Amino acid sequence: MSKRPFFVKTNGECVPLEGAWRTECLDGNWYVIGHHSVVPCSSERAAQNMLEELHAQTDIDLLASEAIETLGRISESWETDSLHEADPT
């Protein structure tokens, strides 16, 4: 999967690759494009399957990023309180 800002068709027309994943039939060939990437596919069905796979992977990546980001915002007292390790005074 190559990464670039646009896909250049055989006639020189540039198709932007930013934005969400989507399927496109360009010059009779099927692709999944988006996120500055292009994935060539053998058919419309293959493009739809790849789109579903990429959406699932994107969702997983977003969830993982959010979880990692949130870890840095959890206070130390919350961690000990949630584990019932707080000093009983």
Image (tube, rainbow, N blue to C red):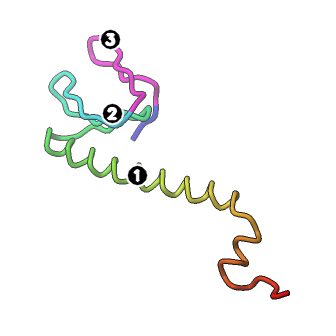
Depth check, front residue: 77 or 30:
77
Please tell me which residue is depicted at 32% across the width and 11% down the height of the picture.
Answer: 12
Residue 7 percent across, percent down from the top left: 36, 23
Q: Secondary structure at mark 3?
A: loop
Residue under label 2, please give it: 33
Location of residue 37 by image quarter: top left
Residue at far bottom of view: 88
**Which image quarter holds the C terminus?**
bottom right
Label ID, residue 88:
none
Mark positioned earlier in the residue sequence (3 or 2): 3
Q: Residue visible at 27% across and 37% down?
A: 40
Q: Which residues are magenta?
A: 4-19
Q: Position of residue 27 (x, y in %)?
A: 19, 21
Look at the magenta stretch and give its main secondary structure: loop
Question: Which residue occupies the foreground of this view, 61 or 50?
Answer: 61
What label sits on residue 59 in the rendered view?
1
Judge by depth and name the residue closer to the eye, 62 or 10: 62
Q: Nearer the viewer, mark 3 or mark 2?
A: 2
Q: Total number of numbered labels? A: 3
Q: Earlier in the sequence, mark 1 or mark 2?
A: 2
Amino acid type for the residue under numbered disc 3? Gly
Mark 1–mark 2 contact, CB under 8 Å? Answer: no
Q: What numbered label is drawn on residue 12?
A: 3
Residue 29 horizontal side relative to residue 89, left or right: left
Q: Is residue 42 covered in magenta?
A: no
Name the residue type under label 2: Ile
Residue 72 locus on image (x, y percent): 70, 58
Picture residue at 20% right of the left edge, 33% below the top: 30
Q: Residue 15, percent across and down?
A: 34, 19
Q: Is residue 10 above or below residue 63?
A: above
